Amino acid sequence: DAGVTQSPTHLIKTRGQQVTLRCSPKSGHDTVSWYQQALGQGPQFIFQYYEEEERQRGNFPDRFSGHQFPNYSSELNVNALLLGDSALYLCASSLASTSGFGTQYFGPGTRLLVL
Amino acid sequence: QKEVEQNSGPLSVPEGAIASLNCTYSDRVSQSFFWYRQYSGKSPELIMSIYSNGDKEDGRFTAQLNKASQYVSLLIRDSQPSDSATYLCAPHRRSGGYQKVTFGTGTKLQVIP
C-alpha cells in the first residue's frame, strides 16, 4: 500500500523566485491538505483540496496557490519567495466521507530553503 | 488564547517511567483528537486517535479525553529512548463538510537511558 509521497525532498531557492512542490496521496485517499512547518513550530494549515477544488484555506497570502489533478495528486505553488517561506512543507492525505473523521497521513515533506 | 496549547518541554523522563503529555484546546466543537509523533527532521507520524470521553489504550500508549474540560492527554508507559521525539496534539472538527485540523506546537520528550 503506497503511502503519501512528496517531491522534491529538498529545495534551495532565492528570494523572489517561484517554487512548485508535488504530492501524491495514499492509495484510496481523495483529499490533500498542505501544511507549513517552521522550525520549532507545529504544522500550520495552508489549504485543502478535494474534487480538484480548494475547499478550505488557512491564513496564508495569495502567493500560496495550489492545484489538484484528477488522479488526486496535488501541487503547491509559492510565488515571490521570501526568506520567511523557508520551512518544511508537509502534504497530508485523507478520505472524505459523510461520516467519520478523515484521519490524515503525512508524507515525508519537502524542506525549502530560501536564500 | 491559542487554539491548541501544549507545554513545549523538553519533558525528561528516565527509561521505563511513564511520560505524561498534556494538551488543551479552545474549540468546543472539536470532535476527534489525534496524537502525532515527530522525530527531528522527519514528518509527523500518527500514533493515536480518540473520539469519546475516557481512555483509549493501544500498546504502551493511552490517550485520555475530557471534552468538558477541553483536555486531552497521552500517556506513554515503559518509556524507551526511541520514544524521544516531539509529540503533536491535533484536534479535528468538521467545517462546512470538511475537516479542520489545528496542531499544537508540540511537546519535546526526552527519555534518558
Image (spheres, helix red, strand yellow):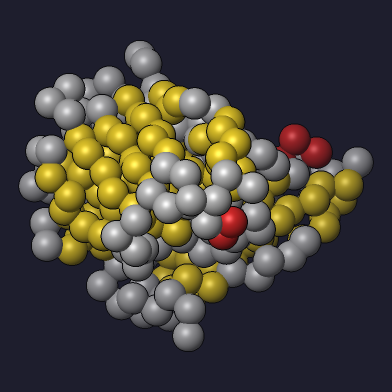
Identified at 17% across, 22% down, the residue is A71
Out of B74 and A106, give the one closest to the viewer. Answer: A106
In the image, taking residue A50 as reference, residue B30 lies left or right, namely right
Q: Residue furthest top?
A: A1
Out of A77 and B73, give the one closest to the viewer. Answer: A77
In the image, taking residue A18 as reference, residue B21 lies left or right, namely right
Q: Residue furthest bottom?
A: B1
Residue B48 can be seen, yes or no? no
Q: In which quadrant will I find the C terminus of chain B?
A: top right
| Quadrant in the rendering for residue A29 | top left
| Quadrant in the rendering for residue A27 | top left
Identified at 36% across, 63% down, the residue is A60
Residue B68 vs A107, above or below: the answer is below
Please provide percent x and percent y for residue A31.
Answer: 22, 38
Residue A13 vs A65, above or below: the answer is above
Out of B54 and A32, give the one closest to the viewer. Answer: A32
Please provide percent x and percent y for residue A84.
Answer: 56, 59
Identified at 60% across, 36% down, the residue is A12
Question: Could you tell me how many numbered marks the image carries?
Answer: 0
In the image, taking residue A98 as reference, residue A56 lies left or right, namely right
Residue A11 can be seen, yes or no? yes
Q: Residue furthest front?
A: A16
Identified at 8% across, 47% down, the residue is A98
Please provide percent x and percent y for residue B102.
Answer: 40, 62
